[in-house]
Image (cartoon, helix red, strand yellow):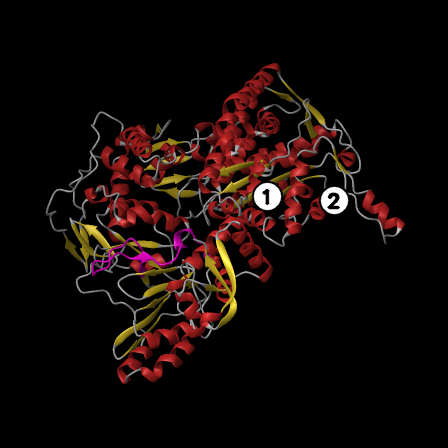
């Protein structure tokens, strides 16, 4: 393989167009050689079989591998089924109507199906199934594709010239996979019983044997593959030639007797604790080894692929240089290219390759009208939080299996919010209550910063301010406040909590969210109970109910969720009626990463001392027992905004009022900026205490400026994301699905009585309810709404077809 093969530009391949959406949904996909069904690698201008492709059944491809695969010309895409994907596939390959009818009698309907040349493939939730294949008269009937198998995805060209297409409105890349139905536990037994009477002796032998796809003749057995060999070569060359790249790419690196030293500034370390030598690179503060590619990637805040290319150019490894591979111990040289490949132009030698690459990426993003933030990453000021916040972030980064700097900053802020809580109030009546939601891909390190918050607060003796992992009702919110009037709730799946709160029949969860909205605005006031009927209560019970009054309730949240769950949960009322506007939504755009081997480390002693000092300084001002008594007003320390910080906040309010809110008024999302300045003022208090000397309670311009920029950045980011990704309401999404099912009625198979109705375009009520997977009350609500909107109609039976049940139809 040539290094230039990785740079072939081919944005139109099915893999390049579609793969990232599947990866984002946790689905492992691999490239398919064009016009075939074989996983392939592109090398030397030719496609070859990909060896050991089944390994991607256990882990997602790395970013570098994806960068290579995206560039391969005309690459198709295959999905690996099994445990990692959480999906199995039923591939029906027969057109025999009698056999199909029997299969459909035992096969549950799937909302996600695709088709190639004939038959179709239906997807189900994985429950430990094993691979199985059935055939009749030596002709394929059906495959059950589980662990270690792959199936070609829509957009890919079938060997016979047709393109795979979706048969359903829902597709795997945007579907909540846990909503897929499961196959019956005895499905294989049912299938065997169904087809065995039709099978020949050879068919039964085929069924008894485990049939797995064999490597075709001539497939290259490359061990770790071309990609691994390519960046292994880069790392080896880099260690042997430190002077050619370290001064250029590693800011502040200092030479020593054996190589160089630098700071681990990606985790805000202050000491020169990273050793760079020919023997290897090691962060002695974090106690982990690094490659040269890792170091450049973190030092320059670029992607893995960009770091590889920067090193390749700095070391002057020619684009035409061939990597020597071995097969069965013998050297193998790729065949020469039959024609020159289109490659990315190499930058001039006098220009920094990292700068050239950034400019190229930015131009590409602008041309495609994609999100600029994805290319740039977060602003520098976010990655360099001030004072003690930076120290806490450094510890989180040092001990993190996956690097998520934006989430570390959010968690450090949550520590300050929880520790200060009811103990500090600004001279404008602000407390430090903040609702923070961390949004990142599944399995990409959201739990680590949450765990660090708990560890640090516990080490400082502040266990009592850590509440439970959520609230089940409005009464649960009040009860938590009665126990601890100032606390932080660390919620692992806050997106699901939001989703449940707006689901039909979930009034308690809805009330909990509404109560939190109320608490957010009551920090400087009193939370009083609702008026309840006292009928039937004893005098003591009535008195207890009336006494549930909380003075100065201060609640902070640190939630975590995935983008898909979060934006699907944002119904119209959550967006427009207050909750989202009170939240700082911190969405990480970091791609999927391989987990690092890191050792646990206790919270930094200075961070523990800082948390303790926040409490001890307040203790000198008032009785801490009173401070934690919900029935008494708090006596907090007053923090004063300086005139300079007030001027910054007034200028920010002017920008919000006359520029930012009018920009989003037409979309109705301007209300997400109503609380923006208030959140910035609360955050200013935390930043000031992180920057100031002990007992210094001035909120200076530096603290206010950082807080304003932080909140402004994330509030504008969430508005843009909501515009693109939010579904207007859960009901609308359900109606859309219902209409889709009815619209596809003619394509469905069923028993004879229902089939006559389906052929006319009608959808029997029982079949539609099964497809929607809803209880009767929810189903009737969705149907009634769709009828009211004029989308569907309903008839009570069809006499001409001798059908007595309820049938739904699309309105013309």
Label 1 SS: helix
Does residue 605 appear in the picture of this structure?
Answer: no
Determine the main secondary structure of the stretch shown in magenta: loop
Q: What element carries label 2?
A: helix
Q: Residues within 10 Å of mark 2 (few under 14, many from 20)?
A: some
* Residue located beneath label 1 in the image: 455
Q: Is residue 646 above or below residue 478?
A: above
Q: Name the residue under label 2.
A: 483
Residue at image location 23% in from the left, 41% down from the top: 9
| 173 in the magenta segment | yes
Instruction: State the image coordinates of residue 286 (x, y, percent, origin top left).
Output: 46, 40
The reply to whether the magenta stretch includes residue 739 is: no
Q: Do the residues labelled 2 and 1 touch (CB within 8 Å)?
A: no
Residue drawn at the location 54% of the way across and 24% of the way down: 656
Above or below 134: residue 673: above
The magenta stretch is 151-177
Q: Quadrant of residue 154?
A: bottom left
Is 486 located above or below residue 26 in the figure? above
Q: Nearer the viewer, residue 602 or 464?
A: 464
């Amino acid at each position: 393989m040539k290094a230039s093969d990785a740079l072939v530009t081919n944005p139109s391949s099915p893999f390049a167009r579609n793969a990232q959406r599947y990866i984002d949904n946790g689905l492992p996909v691999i490239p398919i050689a064009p016009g075939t069904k074989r996983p392939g690698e592109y090398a030397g201008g030719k496609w070859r079989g990909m060896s050991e492709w089944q390994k991607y059944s256990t882990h997602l491809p790395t970013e570098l591998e994806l960068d290579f695969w995206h560039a391969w010309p005309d690459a198709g895409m295959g999905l690996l089924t099994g445990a990692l994907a959480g999906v199995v596939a039923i591939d029906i390959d027969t057109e025999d109507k009698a056999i199909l009818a029997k299969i459909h009698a035992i096969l549950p309907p799937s909302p996600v199906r695709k088709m190639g040349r004939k038959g179709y493939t239906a997807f189900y939730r994985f429950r430990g199934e094993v691979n199985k294949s059935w055939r009749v008269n030596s002709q394929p009937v059906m495959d059950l594709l589980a662990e270690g198998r792959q199936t070609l995805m829509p957009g890919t060209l079938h060997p016979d010239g047709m393109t795979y297409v979706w048969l359903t409105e829902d597709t795997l890349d945007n579907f909540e996979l846990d909503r897929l139905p499961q196959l019956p536990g005895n499905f294989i037994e049912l299938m065997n019983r169904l087809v065995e009477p039709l099978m020949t002796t050879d068919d039964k032998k085929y069924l008894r044997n485990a049939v797995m796809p064999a490597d075709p003749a001539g497939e290259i057995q490359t061990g770790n593959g071309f990609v691994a060999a390519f960046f292994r070569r880069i790392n080896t060359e880099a260690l042997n030639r430190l002077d050619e790249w370290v001064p250029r790419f590693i800011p502040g690196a200092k030479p020593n007797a054996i190589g160089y030293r630098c700071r681990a500034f990606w985790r805000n370390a202050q000491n020169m604790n990273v050793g760079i030598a020919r023997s290897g690179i090691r962060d002695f503060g974090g106690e982990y080894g690094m490659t040269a590619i890792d170091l450049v990637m973190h030092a320059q805040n670029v992607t893995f692929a960009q770091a590889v290319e920067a090193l390749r150019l700095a070391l002057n490894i020619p684009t035409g240089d061939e990597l020597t591979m071995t097969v069965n111990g013998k050297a193998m040289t790729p065949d020469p290219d039959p024609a020159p490949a289109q490659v990315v132009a190499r930058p001039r030698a006098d220009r920094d390759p990292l700068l050239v690459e950034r400019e190229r990426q930015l131009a590409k993003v602008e041309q495609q009208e994609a999100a600029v933030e994805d290319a740039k990453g977060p602003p520098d000021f976010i990655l360099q939080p001030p004072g003690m916040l930076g120290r806490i972030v450094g510890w989180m980064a040092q001990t993190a299996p996956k690097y998520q700097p934006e989430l570390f900053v959010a968690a450090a802020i949550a520590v300050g919010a929880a520790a200060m809580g009811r103990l500090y109030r600004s001279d404008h009546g602000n407390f430090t209550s903040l609702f923070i939601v961390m949004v990142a891909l599944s399995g990409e390190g959201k739990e680590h910063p949450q765990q660090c918050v708990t560890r640090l607060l516990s080490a400082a003796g502040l266990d009592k301010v850590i509440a439970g992992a959520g609230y089940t009702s409005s009464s649960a919110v009040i009860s938590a406040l009665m126990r601890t009037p100032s606390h932080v709730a660390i919620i692992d799946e806050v997106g699901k909590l939001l989703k449940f709160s707006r689901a039909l029949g979930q009034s308690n969860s809805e009330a909990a969210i509404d109560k939190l909205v109320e608490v957010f605005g009551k920090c400087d006031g009193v939370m009083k109970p609702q008026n309840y009927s006292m009928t039937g209560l004893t005098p003591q019970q009535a008195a207890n109910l009336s006494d549930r009054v909380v003075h100065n309730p201060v609640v902070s949240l640190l939630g975590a969720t995935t983008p898909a769950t979060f934006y699907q949960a944002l119904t119209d009322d959550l967006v427009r009626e207050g909750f989202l506007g009170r939240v700082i939504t911190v969405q990480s755009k970091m791609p999927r990463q391989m987990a690092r081997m890191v050792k646990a480390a206790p919270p930094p002693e200075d961070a523990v001392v800082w948390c303790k000092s926040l409490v001890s300084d307040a203790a000198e001002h008032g009785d801490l027992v009173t401070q934690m008594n919900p029935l008494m007003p708090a006596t907090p320390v007053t923090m004063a905004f300086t005139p300079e910080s007030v001027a910054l906040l007034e200028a920010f309010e002017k920008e919000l009022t006359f520029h930012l809110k009018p920009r989003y008024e037409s979309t109705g999302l301007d209300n997400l900026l109503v609380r923006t300045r208030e959140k910035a003022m609360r955050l200013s208090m935390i930043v000031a205490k992180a920057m100031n000397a002990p007992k210094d309670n001035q909120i200076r311009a530096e603290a206010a400026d950082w807080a304003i920029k932080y909140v402004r950045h994330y509030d504008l980011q969430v508005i843009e994301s909501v515009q693109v990704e939010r579904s207007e309401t859960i009901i609308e999404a359900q109606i859309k699905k219902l209409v889709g099912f009815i619209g596809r009625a003619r394509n469905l198979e069923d028993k004879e009585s229902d089939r006559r109705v389906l052929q006319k375009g009608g959808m029997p009520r029982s079949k539609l309810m099964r497809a929607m997977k809803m209880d009767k009350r929810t189903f009737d609500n969705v149907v009634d709404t769709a009828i009211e909107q004029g989308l569907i109609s309903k008839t009570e039976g069809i006499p001409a077809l001798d059908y007595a049940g309820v049938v739904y139809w699309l309105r013309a």
